[in-house]
Image (cartoon, rainbow, N blue to C red):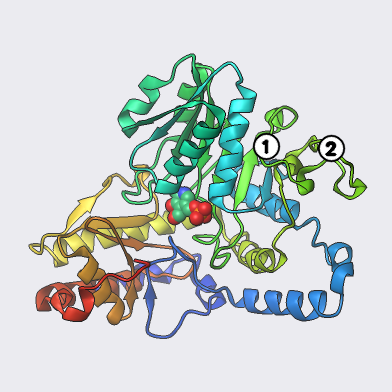
Amino acid sequence: MNRADAETLDATDPLARFRDAFALPPGVIYLDGNSLGPLPRAAVERVALTVGQEWGQGLITSWNAAGWIEAPQRLGGKIARLIGAKANEVVVADSTSVNLFKLAAGALSLRPERRTLIIESGNFPTDVYVLEGVCALSGAMLKVLPPDEVLGAVDADTAAVVLTQVNYKTARRWDMAATTAAVQAKGALMLWDLCHSAGAVACDLNAANADLAVGCSYKYLNGGPGAPAFLFVAERHQAQIRSPLSGWMGHAAPFAFEDRYRPAADIGAMLCGTPPILGLAALEAGLDLQLEADPKAVEAKGLSLCRLFIDLVESRCAGHGLVLTGPRDMAQRGLHVSFAHPEGYGLVQAMIARGVIGDFREPDIARFGFSPLYLSHADVWDAVEILRDVLETKAFEAPEFRTRAAVT
Ligand SMILES: Cc1ncc(COP(=O)(O)O)c(C=O)c1O
């Protein structure tokens, strides 16, 4: 394998045209779109329009005239197409953490006779923290179990199981359909966190008969820093589920200003307060772009980039102490690759200084994301050559790479 071979793979890339749709700085190979996606050029215009025209000129009339009030449902309908849901099963609102709080409590409302929630250990910390909060308020019990013990622990007291389809560190991917079926066979509900799935890997919530799901939009959906998140409630649960955050936007008639709460009968009941219009405007540009790409081609290219990265690191950087974390079988992984290394932090910093942006996860993980819309196989080749140089020159030992920044 050499750089020309990587270029040959790129020559038939059906997604190559998407690279120009992003305003990536020159000289940067961006391997952190699994944490914060880059800026879609269309977002600049879309946000300028929303600020200058809709807010500046339209003022409050834009809630109706510019479709602001329907934005959570409109964008939800767009995300639904990416995650195998119906348009009326998804809304965009709040953060992933807040949406998880609403749906975990909502799951307890759907299974009132059951008092246990189960989550995997090693999950992204907010998922466990949020469930701890839900259990503290509701009196339900939380079981935090290693992934391979989760399914065996589901019993008649389990209201819901919360799993992240693609693990944030290892990229291990759950089999969504088989796992959902196993959980539901015990009468429990299945709640998926799709933060590392949406816009990256195949995800078909309805085909898997999933009950509930949450996810963020600032990673592979390129919605921008702090972009509003999404949530999914299967149509069959919408009339019964209760959100613990009974805000006015989830009311059956928000503009009737009734004295008491009456939940909307549809997915709108999962809304709480006023939608963040500027964030939604940026996100819509990212979603419109993503919807132009064939999801099968997105996953196939992403896995091809990951496979090439793993092969090249293990061949060209052999003997430098990098250990692959997570599955080798492509069918069992998402679109980021993690290598453990005792100097993981310095390694990532030295690469960033050379224009290859990845990230570090405690305690020793150098993590690299392979977002298919703007990366090429040649980028992967170049990134590995830079990694090899950092390892061979021990550039990670430089004093400036020793002090950890607040955000790693
Ligand atoms: C699996 C998972 N869930 C949740 C989050 C973050 O949640 P929030 O958007 O509320 O910060 C992340 C962030 O990386 C994540 O990886």
- Residue 13: quadrant of the picture: bottom left
Residue type marked 2: Arg
Select label 1 or label 2 by which is in front. 2
Figure quadrant of the C terminus: bottom left
- Label 2 lies in ligand 1 vicinity (Cβ under 8 Å): no
The front one of 393 and 51 is 51
For residue 243, the mark is: 1
Which residue ends up furthest to the left in the rendered image? 319
Q: Which residue corresponds to the image point at 72% horizontal and 32% vertical from the top-left?
A: 238
N-term-proximal mark, 1 vs 2: 1
> Could you tell me which secondary element the residue under label 2 belongs to?
loop
In the image, residue 177 sits, relative to residue 373, either above or below, namely above
User: Label 2 crowding class (10 Å Cα cut-off): few <14, some 14-19, many 20+?
Assistant: few
The reply, left or right, for residue 316 in relation to residue 368 is left
The front one of 54 and 235 is 54
Q: Position of residue 374 (x, y in %)?
A: 47, 70
> Could you tell me which secondary element the residue under label 1 belongs to?
loop
In the image, residue 27 sits, relative to residue 137, either above or below, namely below
Figure quadrant of the N terminus: bottom left
Q: Which residue corresponds to the image point at 86% horizontal and 69% vertical from the top-left?
A: 60
The front one of 302 and 399 is 399
User: Label 1 crowding class (10 Å Cα cut-off): few <14, some 14-19, many 20+?
Assistant: many
Q: Is residue 105 visible?
A: yes
Q: Which residue corresponds to the image point at 33% horizontal and 47% vertical from the top-left?
A: 330
The front one of 107 and 219 is 107
**Distance between the alpha carbons at the discs numbered 1 and 2:** 15 Å
Q: Position of residue 257 (x, y in %)?
A: 89, 47
The residue indicated by pointer 2 is 260
Residue type marked 1: Ser
The reply, left or right, for residue 337 in relation to residue 39 is left
Q: Position of residue 253 (x, y in %)?
A: 87, 43
Q: Is residue 205 visible?
A: no
